[in-house]
Amino acid sequence: MCDVCGCGNHEHSENNLVVSDDSARKNVEIKKSLLSENDRVAESNRKHFDEHGILAINLISSPGSGKTTLLERTIEALKDEISIGVLEGDIETERDAERVRAKGAAAVQLTTGGACHLEAPLVHKGFHALEKQMRGYPDVLFIENVGNLVCPSSFYLGEHIRVVLISVPEGSDKPAKYPKAFKTSDVFVITKSDLLPFFDFDVEKVKEEALSLNPNLKIFVVSSKTGEGLEDWFNFIRKEVSRKKAQTV
């Protein structure tokens, strides 16, 4: 899957995934070293954000869950009261950054060239580019991670809040299938709620399973198309930005 983190470094038999003891040991050693360096830079990122009163929010989800659309709606609603900066993570293209800029927020595209997640050093470089673009610091920094529910959950970027999103068309089983994404997140957003009449998606069951993994999750059910639940989400962002400013004064 990923040449950077080594999560695709396995051998396949005809029917099963096979990992030799030696291969597994080497893979663990590489990952430990990579994560250690990533965490070191992430702590530096966090210190930088804290020094300047910036609330950093890391958005993780599968491709197509609606991260960028939710960002667009958030920018439209809050740009006149909160300064917003965005780091857009994708394997290729600058399309999402262009969408965000069109809504009035500063954005820097982070293209990984194949890696299935963002890492703290790339966020560090991207944020300095964003500072130059904005000629200052945002009140809130949104980091839209690469579409993937696996690797991004293992890489701390220095964020204050991690948000995991799943959309109604993806199905109700994502918390059970991808537990680490929910265990390491602070907020869970169910998107595309306008499609509930057309899919077998049990909102209460999904909430129950997510909370069984992480009882502290704050949960929002939203539709970027109809606006359902968005005001609660906007108010959450307002509250957290205000809280961060109060801590910085």
Image: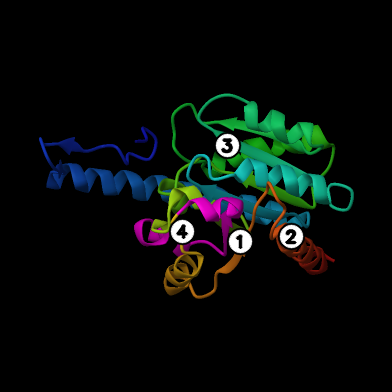
Disc 3 versus disc 1: nearer the observer: 1
Q: Which secondary structure lies at badge 4?
A: loop
In terms of sequence position, does the residue under pointer 2 or pointer 1 come before the other?
A: 1
Farthest-out residue, left: 14
Label 3 neighbourhood size at 10 Å, few (<14), some (14-19), many (20+)? many
Q: Amino acid at mark 4?
A: Phe
Label 3 secondary element: strand
- At x 48% / y 41%, what residue is drawn? 117
Asked which quadrant contains residue 95, the reply is top right
Task: Using the image as rendered, state which of residue 233 and residue 110 is in the foreground.
Answer: 233
Do the CB atoms of the residues marked 3 and 1 lie less than 8 Å apart?
Answer: no
CA separation in Å, label 1 and label 4 = 12 Å
User: Label 3 belongs to which residue?
Assistant: 89
Q: Position of residue 77 (x, y in %)?
A: 81, 50
Which amino acid type corresponds to the residue marked 1 in the rendered image? Val
- Which residue is labeled 4 in the image? 201
| Element type at mark 2 | helix
Give the magenta-colored segment's residue range.
175-199
Q: Earlier in the sequence, mark 3 or mark 4?
A: 3
Q: Residue at x 43, y 56 (%)?
A: 200
Q: Amino acid at mark 2?
A: Ile
Residue 130 position in % (x across, y down): 74, 36
**Whole-Å distance between the Cαs marked 3 and 4?**
28 Å
Where is mark 1, residue-wise? 221
Q: Is residue 214 visible?
A: yes
Q: Are marks 2 and 1 in contact (CB under 8 Å)?
A: no
Secondary structure of residue under mark 1: strand
The mark nearer the N terminus, 3 or 1, is: 3
Q: Residue furthest front?
A: 197
